[in-house]
Amino acid sequence: MAPKVIGPYRVLETLGSGGVGTVYRAIDRRTGDVAALKLLSTGPALDPRAARRLAREFETLQHMSHPNVVKVYDTGVFQGYPYLAMELVEGLTLRHYLALAEEDLASDAALAKAIAAHRAPGGPAPEPSYDSDADEEDEDAQSGVFNLATFGEEAPSEEFSDEEAFESGPDRVRAWADLADEPDTSVSDSDDVKVPYDLPAQEERAIGVKLSAAELDRLNPPERIGRLKDAMLQLCEALAYIHGYGLIHRDLKPSNVMVDEDRTVRLMDFGLAKYISDDGAVTADGRLVGTFRYMSPEQILGEKLDTRTDLYSLGVILYELLAGRPPFEAKTPYELWQKVLETEAAPIASINSRADRILSRVAHRLIRKEPDDRFQTAEEVYEALIE
């Protein structure tokens, strides 16, 4: 049963649930604004790391404002439950948006109807996603779209009282996480990578099996390629903006890119974001963070990162959406890492002979092993895409 009230927010319905929490559609009783409210679990599912990530996500985004970057509003702890209030983006993940049929995009009304169909009970199943850090599960369990199934009757209106049991601010979330942790607990290198490998969402075929004629037909309509290019351009603008602040996203993947009814792309989930100026590499706490399939070689090696690691991830996304499969396929994380570090990806044209040549060239340059061999900025990628 969903709570009726979470701090200053009145819950309207459940949007989705994952391993470490639940996301609700809620109204801020102080302002009347609608928000997506992420509430972390307690009890057996309690995860202090997820709470610290929640606080980091708020601090990262609270001063940022860009049409292609999700906004955050508030964070705090309500009756022992950490929460984060953010912009409610009602739309589709990038992968689902690109899978829409042409008739679903004939007009804004048609797109809105298609999005509503995905939200409805019995709509398409969400993409499975198994990430390299357990903190990921709350977002990606519903990575296709938010499930807007009706949650009974709407809760009655209540007057907001600031005496209710909630404390706002990222410091309160971190304090809760510190209390939840056992004292003197540390993470050793031997605890590295304890969660499943992120299998390709659409893949049931054996590794290396060629795409069927029907799959090639779905990948290559000019209208789909136009949508893909437009989404990539908007994503470049989002990356250019956050990189301008010295921020690295570190977990760029299709399920963290949403497209709304206006065809506006939003870059989501900044819980793993990190400033370049921060000391330490990607494995500073003894764990590899991110999603295996989209990790750059330098991220896998635990080296100090810069914004070019996000550009590598962008290249993996573009390759996958052009070829219908990721550039490197493997049955285990270690086999995957070996391929990423030591082998070259198959030419997209050898998998999809009808793939757009310009987009393919951009994808291949982005996934080069050495950061110096890639595009150096998101602005450069943008310019290459519009040639």
Image (cartoon, rainbow, N blue to C red):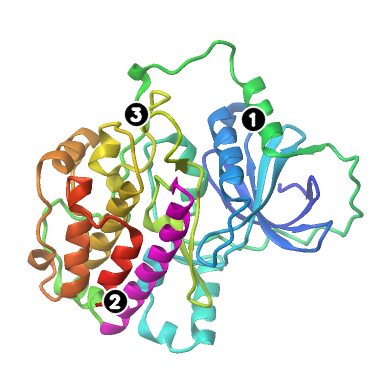
**Distance (Cα) linking label 1 and label 3:** 24 Å
- Counting residues from the N terminus, which is met first, the one under dot 2 or under dot 3? 3
Kind of element beneath mark 1: helix
Q: Residue at x 14, y 41 (%)?
A: 339
Q: Which residue is mark 3?
A: 193
Q: Amino acid at mark 3?
A: Val
**Which label was assigned to residue 308?**
none
Label 3: how many Cα within 10 Å (few below 14, some 14–19, many 20+): some
From the top left corner, tell me how far across and down residue 290 is, in percent: 38, 41
Kind of element beneath mark 2: loop
Q: Which residue is mark 2?
A: 386
Kind of element beneath mark 3: loop
Residue 150 part of the magenta segment:
no
Image quadrant holding the C terminus, namely bottom left
From the top left corner, tell me how far across and down residue 98 is, in percent: 36, 72
- Discs 1/3, front: 1
**Distance (Cα) linking label 2 and label 3:** 39 Å
Q: Which residue is mark 1?
A: 174
Please state if 94 lies on the left or on the right of 44 as rendered.
left
Query: Residue 115 or 354: which is nearer the viewer?
Result: 354
